[in-house]
Image (cartoon, grey):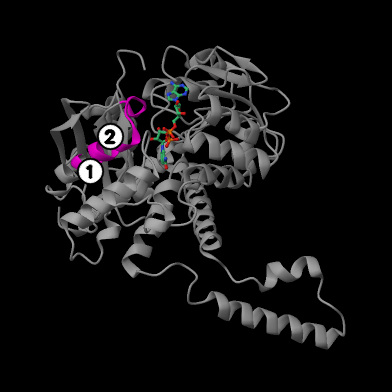
Amino acid sequence: MSSSENFLDSVNKMFDRSATLLNLSSGLAEKIKVANSTYTVRFGVRLRDKLETFTGFRSVHSEHWEPVKGGIRYSPFASQMEVEALAALMSYKCSLMDLPFGGSKGALIIDPQKWRKKELQRITRRFTQELAKRDLIHPSQNVPGPDMGTGENEMAWIADEYKRLHPTEIDALACVTGKPVRKGGIEGRIEATGRGIQYVLREFFEHPEDYKKAKLSPDLEGQRIIIQGFGNVGYHAAKFLSEEEGARITAIIEHQGSVINDKGIDIASLKEHFKEKGSFEGFNGFSSDSNKILEKKCDILIPAAVEGVIDSTNADRISAKLIVEAANGPVTAEADQLLSKKGVLIIPDFYANAGGVTVSYFEWVKNLTHMRYGLMQRREQERRQTALISGLEEMMNKDFPVSLKDIVTNGATEIDLVRSGLEETMRNGYKRISRKWHADKRISDLRTAAMVIAIKRIADSYYFLGI
Ligand code: NAD
């Protein structure tokens, strides 16, 4: 991100562009835009014979719905402004996707690579105490989840620490999402954001008007895709798009280099290599270049790492036809305008990466109902479908095709239901945004369309509260 652009300014500029189209009552746009509160906590943990002081943040952007929702990031570069930008995006995301949450986000300034697992556990538990005693973690007020640098382990420690502080709280597990399945999590949460990207693209290619605008051919199969970031989101997006949709992942960009293969990278092998070596070095097609590869020719570019990687200094060299913002804020407000002028279509972050919070919503509901999805209906479904097939076989005097029998008779499991709910949510989201884009001549792109929908809903919510 160039020095004149910062993440929070960028999110606010994008907000302003859309808010002016809405004729909101005086002062309401400003009220929606600003963060309601941001707490900074500083705490000490004795580690390696030294008292280490850590700084963390939890920002609450909008409480028009409670609980507020948003991940916790572990990064040496975290800052208050970054957290406020991310919290704002969470409000717009939940509003756009019709999820019953306000927006929040948290971060701890830490390089997780520097600490052992046991140490990270102690730090996370202490951070949890600081947040929980201010109700910044709470099943009905503020529900964190994973983000960059955090995952299932951190979420399990947060849930456990919260439970220790509130031993009689029956809904304690709902205080955080992204937990391991064995610790109150839900099947399909880890893959959810990458899986969501797959569904976004499936739906995009159902809209000829949209893919023609991007000058893309009609099918997802065979599209050349470059992905930046091979963490949770980037890896899962790469895996599902290549293995299930037949897209060609022609480059993957990481910190210390990239892998390039115009015929399509074998994602499973790369994952194994990356896990073992911690870098791409030595893998077929390795290049020590990172940033330049973003500019390489492709059909679809998926930035899935950090914010601000496409800014006013490199936007004119981006040669993708479509950008899917899997990361939060990868394209700055200035770059957004430059790319639009060039005819590059952008599917905005607060829609594109909403798969994570959508499945987090399913997890939160699961924790509150204290029952796993599919438990009550699965066997009953199987019994009825099996009876139906037997009836058909009897009537036709023929066996039902073996290849279809299992598909028809198997009742839905938790993972089936999660994927189905996620696909429904992501596809409907795209339909809404695209419809809005084409229905209003003043709206020139998908981001503005999505933002107009999100802001209007928050504004309506404030109106009905009498604000
Ligand atoms: P992660 O920590 O699992 O992975 C991030 C990867 O990006 C790492 O492998 C890191 O080495 C790489 N990376 C970081 N900076 C880079 C750079 N400048 N160039 C190339 N590679 C770089 O994080 P994640 O959970 O995959 O999150 C990635 C992005 O997606 C973040 O912006 C996050 O806010 C967003 N997001 C994540 C989720 C989720 O469910 N995890 C949900 C919504 C949005």
Left or right relative to 116: residue 279: right
Q: Which image quarter is the N terminus in?
A: top left
Question: From where the camera sits, is residue 141 visible?
Answer: no
Mark 2 in CB contact with mark 1 (< 8 angstroms): no
Q: Quadrant of ligand 1?
A: top left
Question: From where the camera sits, is residue 260 visible?
Answer: yes
Left or right relative to 56: residue 207: right
Specify the quadrant of the image occupied by residue 56.
top left
Left or right relative to 187: residue 111: left
The main secondary structure of the magenta stretch is helix
- Type of amino acid at the residue the image marks with label 2: Glu
Q: Position of residue 262 (x, y in %)?
A: 70, 23
Specify the quadrant of the image occupied by residue 205.
top right
Q: How far, Cα to Cα, is label 2 from label 1?
A: 10 Å
Q: Nearer the viewer, residue 109 or 282?
A: 282
Say which element carries label 2: helix
Please tell me whether residue 63 belongs to the stretch shown in magenta.
no
- Type of amino acid at the residue the image marks with label 1: Arg
Q: Nearer the viewer, residue 105 or 64?
A: 105
Part of the protein shown in magenta: 111-126
Mark on residue 119? 2
Q: Position of residue 142 (x, y in %)?
A: 23, 51
Mark on residue 162? none
Specify few, some or many for label 2: CA neighbours under 10 Å numbering under 14, 14-19, or 20 or more: some
Residue tagged by mark 1? 125
Q: Position of residue 336 (x, y in %)?
A: 43, 25
Say which element carries label 1: helix
Looking at the rendered image, the disc whose residue lies closer to the viewer, 2 or 1, is 2
Q: Earlier in the sequence, mark 2 or mark 1?
A: 2
Farthest-out residue, right:
397
Specify few, some or many for label 1: CA neighbours under 10 Å numbering under 14, 14-19, or 20 or more: many
